């Protein structure tokens, strides 16, 4: 069963660093582009954001790097909604290489924002409905092992 959202891209020349692989900041850029596509996918494209005077902010992110990507490599980012409430989305994105191997993950918390008020606000009705359907689909998938991780040095 497929997840409810996916995004495709290619590692650009300018994304490669002095080590010859995709720079860590560029993974974030690719995930950010996927998040923007996800926001459009749930019904908050540019026109709808204008109509409702509504947008989405990122509150928190956590990236895990597993494998290197190189110039010209193509990737697919698949999204899995882990949770939703009236104004927040707990989203997990996984980047796969051409071989279908996981190369990086990003966990993030997004919040819907009323631009007139400048604060968090409930998702417009049709967006909330779409998120509910997507969550129902995504909950059928196993929770990613990287979800909920904290950074720290394990003591032996």
Image (cartoon, rainbow, N blue to C red):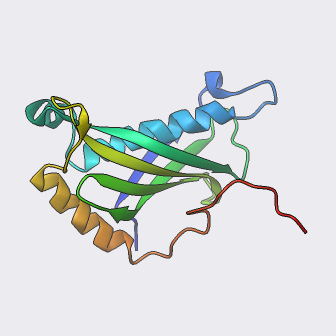
Left or right for 112, reference 24: left
Q: Nearer the viewer, residue 119 or 103?
A: 119
**Count of numbered labels shown in the rendering:** 0
Q: Nearer the viewer, residue 116 or 57?
A: 116
Q: Please state the horizontal and vertical placement of residue 12, each as a whole percent of the image.
A: 59, 28
When the figure is inspected, residue 10 is found, relative to residue 152, above or below; the finding is above
Q: Outermost residue toward the top? A: 14
Q: Outermost residue toward the right? A: 156
Q: Please state the horizontal and vertical placement of residue 22, each as a whole percent of the image.
A: 68, 34
Left or right for 41, reference 91: left
Please identify the quarter of the rendering in which residue 120 is found. top left
Please identify the quarter of the rendering in which residue 34 is found. top left
When the figure is inspected, residue 97 is found, relative to residue 138, above or below; the finding is above
Image quarter of the N terminus: bottom left
Image quarter of the C terminus: bottom right
| Residue under the image location 39 percent in, 78 percent down | 140
| Residue under the image location 24 percent in, 50 percent down | 42
Q: Nearer the viewer, residue 58 or 76?
A: 58
Q: Please state the horizontal and vertical placement of residue 114, each as a whole percent of the image.
A: 19, 37
Left or right for 26, reference 116: right
When the figure is inspected, residue 47 is found, relative to residue 66, above or below; the finding is above
| Residue under the image location 52 percent in, 45 percent down | 61
Q: Please state the horizontal and vertical placement of residue 149, each as a whole percent of the image.
A: 62, 61
| Residue under the image location 19 percent in, 50 percent down | 123
Please identify the quarter of the rendering in which residue 55 is found. top left
């Amino acid at each position: 069963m497929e997840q409810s959202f996916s995004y495709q891209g290619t590692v650009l020349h300018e994304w490669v660093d002095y080590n010859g692989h995709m720079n860590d900041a560029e993974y974030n850029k690719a995930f950010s582009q996927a998040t923007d596509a996800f926001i459009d996918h749930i019904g908050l494209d540019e026109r709808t954001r204008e109509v409702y005077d509504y947008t989405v902010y990122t509150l928190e992110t956590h990236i895990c790097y597993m494998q290197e990507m190189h110039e010209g490599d193509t990737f697919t980012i698949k999204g899995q909604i882990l949770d939703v409430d009236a104004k927040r989305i707990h989203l997990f994105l996984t980047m796969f290489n051409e071989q279908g191997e996981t190369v990086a993950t990003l966990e993030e918390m997004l919040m819907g924002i009323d631009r007139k008020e400048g604060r968090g606000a409930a998702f417009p009705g049709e967006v909330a409905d779409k998120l509910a359907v997507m969550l129902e689909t995504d909950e059928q998938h196993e929770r990613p092992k990287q979800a909920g991780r904290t950074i720290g040095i394990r003591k032996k």
